[in-house]
Amino acid sequence: MRSHRRAFLKSSLAASTLVSMGSTTVPAFLARSAHGASAEANDRVLVVVQLIGGNDGLNTVVPHGLDGYARHRRVLRLPSGQIHKISKEVGLHPAMGGMAKLLEEGRLAVVQGVGYPNPDRSHFRSMEIWESARREEGALETGWLGRTIDALPRPTGRDATALHVGNRGLPLALKAKHSEAPSLERLEQYRLQLAGDAGDQRTMRAALDQVARLDRAADDPLLGFMRRSTLTAYDSSKRLEQVIQPAAGKSSYPNYGLARRLELIAQIVKAGFGTRIFYTALDGFDTHANQLGTHAALLTELSDSIAAFHKDLAGSGQADRVALLTFSEFGRRVAENASGGTDHGAAAPLFVVGPVKTAGLIGPHPSLEDLEDGDLNHHTDFRRVYASLLETWLACPSRQAVGAGFEPLPLFRSV
């Protein structure tokens, strides 16, 4: 037993250095326990895509048939004949063919006029408000999803409740008091990396297999802990390698950064990991000048990436358990500026993709005549959208995350 103990501890400590993920040594946050990876009864997934910079909602969900659009948008006006019609008056940008198809399939809801009272046009401050779901000034330690992570059950040894995919650092939205949401750019970061040549690697794998066969040693807490840690790392790596291999060279996603991030998320979802919340972003929406072409390219990337993501999930039977939300820190001014762009505004639309209850427009388009300092007036507080995602999708009380008094919208059908 002493010989086994020494051999076990030696190989366990070696195993703990095999996977590099910043300050953490083993990818326990991605690993199911050694008891298996069966799906939980309530296994719905939420994916949040943040549009950084302030998306021009008026040229995303276009009020081409409303009085005032052509008057305020001369250079940036989009031809009515090219717009993907949602109603007689409102439609999607011409570049959003992928999202228009999701609308036809009954998988896209467009929540119009979303914002908050007394809007702030500072990128930093408005992002802080959206990500924290709080209006009070000062340093904020947690975000709306971070508080959700703390509230959701997380059995010991299972996957992290939330995961950030990107290279910008962990957003405030995911910061929690009692939980940690890891961040990654590529799935390959978490593969088992064995040192040495092929012979050394075979020896190390054999040692890990031996560890897996050792008795639980219930009378030795240290041995039991080390064994579980090793099994977690080993099992996680093997499962991740299975996720990565089939995808190599066979991607059906377009060649965009957002598409690659969503593909990674889809791989993790399809592999049976228990992560409930994923968060990623698309940057570049601060279009003060020469907006027309830049905005079209951004919306093409957004639309085509989300469409590919949904098609991938639908092909594996996962589409009804995944909902996707897009949001931006604010919209843009109604009137274009002299540089062929738009300046910081207020209310804007949000997209929700998944098994929505009612596809199409939710709420009226804000008036183009009744403006507040050149901005659209909001009629739906963004925290009502958050409450809907928490209460009716993730089955998590929303009060702790967004506060009291925000009635959920009827976004989702029963699945």
Image (cartoon, rainbow, N blue to C red):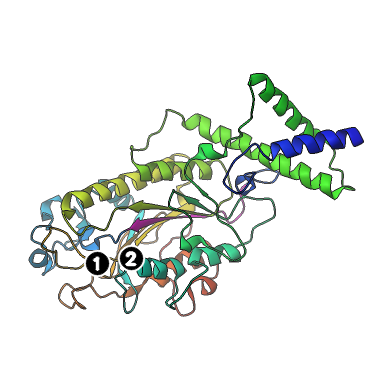
- As drawn, is 157 to the left or to the right of 256? right
Residue 363 picture quarter: bottom left
Q: Is residue 165 above or below residue 385?
A: above
Q: How crowded is mark 2: few (under 14 residues within 10 Å), some or many (20 or more)?
A: some
Q: Residue at x 21, y 73 (%)?
A: 375
Q: How crowded is mark 1: few (under 14 residues within 10 Å), some or many (20 or more)?
A: many
Q: Element type at marker 1?
A: loop
Report the magenta residues as a range. 39-52
Q: Where is residue 355 in the image (x, y as percent from the top left)?
A: 42, 55
Q: Name the residue under label 1.
A: 344
Q: Element type at marker 2?
A: helix
Nearer to the camera, 363 or 158:
158
Q: Which residue is drawn at 86% across and 37% down?
A: 5
Residue 262 picture quarter: top left
- As drawn, is 237 to the left or to the right of 318? right
- Determine if residue 410 is in view: no
CB atoms of marks 1 and 2 within 8 Å: yes
Q: Which amino acid does label 1 sit on?
A: His
User: Which residue sits furthest top?
Assistant: 199
Can you tell which mark lies on residue 123? 2
Separation of disc 1 and disc 2 at Cα?
9 Å
Q: Which of marks 1 and 2 is nearer the N terminus?
A: 2
Q: Where is residue 211 in the image (x, y as percent from the top left)?
A: 78, 34
Q: What residue type is labelled 2?
A: His
Can you tell which mark lies on residue 131? none
Q: If the image is split into quadrants, where does the N terminus sit? A: top right
Q: Residue at x 21, y 50 (%)?
A: 294
Q: Position of residue 46 (x, y in %)?
A: 48, 56
* Residue 22 falls within the magenta-colored stretch: no
